[in-house]
């Protein structure tokens, strides 16, 4: 398996990001820090499910996190 997106998933990415934007707008009562920690917990759980279900390997999950880290420090 791979953590890269298929063409169909690529097409679904923007609408998904827009839905997440709407969701975070609905969480305006919470600070950005609280939202970041909640998203971190959910992302960790999601990555664990992907690895446990063998949709991703541990190495793919770690590569995803490394890529996220690189996005943050830019």
Image: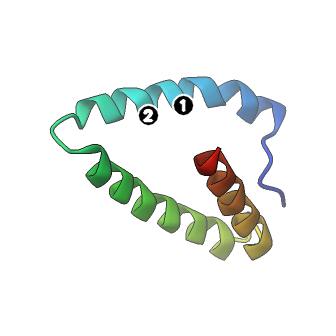
Q: With 74 as the anchor, is 63 left or right in this view?
A: right
Residue 18 point in image, percent of width and height: 48, 24
Q: Position of residue 53 (x, y in %)?
A: 66, 71
Q: CA distance from mark 2 to mark 1?
A: 6 Å
Q: Which part of the image, by quadrant, shows the N terminus?
A: bottom right
Q: How is the image coloured?
A: rainbow
Residue 15 left/right relative to 30: right
Q: Is residue 18 above or below residue 1?
A: above
Who's the residue at 15% across and 38% down the image?
Answer: 29
State left or right for residue 59 relative to residue 43.
Answer: right
**Circle 2 is placed at which residue position?**
20
In contact (CB < 8 Å): disc 2 and disc 1: yes
Q: Residue 55 falls in which quadrant of the image?
A: bottom right
31 or 21: nearer the viewer:
31
Screen quadrant of the C terminus: top right
Q: Toward which corner of the image does residue 31 lie, by quadrant?
A: top left
> Which residue does the numbered mark 1 point to in the structure image?
16
The one of 61 and 31 positioned closer to us in this rendering: 31
Q: In the image, what residue occupies the spot 59% across and 65% down?
A: 47
Residue pictured at 57% horizontal, 71% vertical: 48
Rendered image: mark on residue 55 = none
Query: Total of numbered circles in the picture?
Result: 2
For label 2, the SS is: helix
- Residue at coordinates 19% horizontally, 44% vertically from top-left? 30
Q: Nearer the viewer, residue 39 or 69?
A: 69
Taking the view exactly as shown, the residue that stands out farthest to the front is 74
Residue 66 percent coordinates (x, y): 70, 61
- In the drawing, does residue 18 fall left or right of residue 67? left
SS under mark 1:
helix
Mark 1 surroundings within 10 Å by alpha-carbon count, few (fewer than 14), some (14 through 19), many (20 or more): few
Mark 2, Cα crowd under 10 Å, few <14 / some 14-19 / many 20+, is few
């Amino acid at each position: 398996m791979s953590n890269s997106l298929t063409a169909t998933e690529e097409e679904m990415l923007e609408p998904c990001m827009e839905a997440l934007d709407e969701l975070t707008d609905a969480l305006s009562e919470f600070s950005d820090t609280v939202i970041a920690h909640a998203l971190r917990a959910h992302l960790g759980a999601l990555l664990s499910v992907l690895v446990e279900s063998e949709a991703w390997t541990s190495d793919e999950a770690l590569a995803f996190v490394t890529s996220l880290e690189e996005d943050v420090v830019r």
